[in-house]
Amino acid sequence: MDSASKRGAAAVARPRPTPELLQKLRAGKAALREERIALPLPEKVRQLLELQRIYCSIVGRRRPLRSWERPWDVEP
């Protein structure tokens, strides 16, 4: 059984996004990127460490973390 038949007819009937919606999403993505670029380095490092902790908690629920996957115990 292929993946298309597993999804069923609901995936086929989903409407495509409008050009206006895509333009709005792209503009929002660009604005977020500009905000992140303007952040000072310590804030960027803090966000990186936070995302690593989130990733490790998700992966750690599925399987044991390998030694190189464990986050360092550091604070920016």
Image: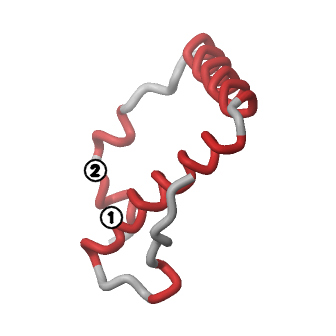
Q: Residue at x 55, y 16 (%)?
A: 21
Mark 1 burial class by Cα count in 10 Å: few <14, some 14-19, many 20+: few
Please state which of residues 11 and 39 is positioned toward the viewer in this rendering.
Answer: 39
Q: Nearer the viewer, mark 2 or mark 1?
A: 1
Q: Residue at x 60, y 11 (%)?
A: 20
Up/down of 72 relative to 11, above or below: below
Q: Which residue is mark 2?
A: 8
Figure quadrant of residue 65 = bottom left
Q: Which residue is mark 1?
A: 58
20 left or right of 9 in image: right
Residue pushed farthest top? 20
Up/down of 62 relative to 24, above or below: below
| Residue 37 position within the rendered picture, expressed as x and y whole percent measured from the top left | 74, 33
| Residue 45, disc | none
Please state which of residues 69 and 5 is positioned toward the viewer in this rendering.
Answer: 69
Q: Residue at x 49, y 72 (%)?
A: 72
Secondary element at image label 1: helix
Q: Amino acid at mark 2?
A: Gly
Mark 2 burial class by Cα count in 10 Å: few <14, some 14-19, many 20+: few
Q: Amino acid at mark 1?
A: Ile
Q: Residue at x 25, y 72 (%)?
A: 61
Up/down of 19 relative to 43, above or below: above
Q: Earlier in the sequence, mark 2 or mark 1?
A: 2
Please state which of residues 25 and 21 is positioned toward the viewer in this rendering.
Answer: 25
| Residue 67 position within the rendered picture, expressed as x and y whole percent measured from the top left | 46, 88
Residue pushed farthest front? 75
